[in-house]
Image (cartoon, rainbow, N blue to C red):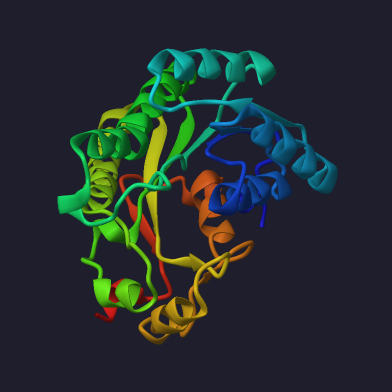
Amino acid sequence: MDLFRLDGKVAAVIGGARNLGYDMAEALADAGCDVMLTSRFADHAEDAAARLSARCGRQMRGEGLDVRRYEDIETLAARARSWKGHVDILINNAGGTPPGTPGPLFDRSPEDIESLIALNLTGSIFCCKAFGQLMAEQAYGKIINISSIAALVGRDRRMYQRNAMAGQAVDYAAAKAGVLGMTRDLAALLAPIGVRVNAIAPGGFGPRDLPEGFVESYSERTPLGHMGRDGLDLKGAAVFLSSPASDYITGHTLVVDGGFSIWQ
């Protein structure tokens, strides 16, 4: 099991203060990693870091970050390196659809679309540039970009409509597909210098505050019979791709969706 240990490693989990980002930060800490995690709101990141440090006994650090601002990412990467002297793992988890914006493409403004692309794609590229430079200099690193099964399959909007949900935007799928293309090409660029780049494409996770009818409909269309479980089902994938167990894997997309994307 030593292949899965992360003792002595340092990770930056972008968007790590809640939900799947928090789960991955917790999993890395449990495996022995010290973690810097970020949120758009610095107090959220600091609170999450304090909770994880108390539970896992690892050194954690919370930082505010807007991934749409490259200068802030560059500053954060330098601060992460000075914290421990090296950064071994980057998880790019910032993203999502900003609340309060319409879902249907024809109702979305150009500003809505540009903002979503910046949050879900451009921000990931910015982080790969800033942190990838550090990893290239130290000739080692693991980059994990978080995409979505929205990059792989079109979604049946009837599930959303039956439960009075807006559904995710077409530009979200475009951005997450871009993350997969970027992952493959960046893996080719950085492989000769010892940096591995992979992606995780999660399916739906919950239940959180999702309507019960939606959770039931989604689960019925998933071969394993349920949505991804918060606090559990993404942790193993994050540790695997961060650890020496995956040293011979790069440019890969690991789909964590209970089979949803194969059974439509």
Task: Please tell me which residue lies in front, 4 or 232.
Answer: 232
Residue in the image at 28% along x and 81% along y = 263
19 shown above or below 208: above
Q: Position of residue 221 (x, y in %)?
A: 35, 83
Residue in the image at 58% along x and 57% along y = 235
Is any part of residue 151 visible from this angle? yes
Q: Quadrant of the C terminus?
A: bottom left
92 shown above or below 218: above
On screen, residue 50 versus residue 201, left or right, reads right
Q: Quadrant of the N terminus?
A: bottom right
Residue in the image at 49% along x and 19% along y = 138
Q: Position of residue 57 (x, y in %)?
A: 83, 41
12 shown above or below 232: above
Residue in the image at 37% along x and 71% along y = 164
Answer with the quarter of the image where residue 254 lies: bottom left
Is any part of residue 156 visible from this angle? no
Residue found at the far left of this picture? 106
> How many numbered discs, if any?
0
Q: Position of residue 166 (x, y in %)?
A: 33, 62
Task: Please tell me which residue lies in front, 132 or 209.
Answer: 209
On screen, residue 61 versus residue 130, left or right, reads right
On screen, residue 114 versus residue 28, left or right, reads left
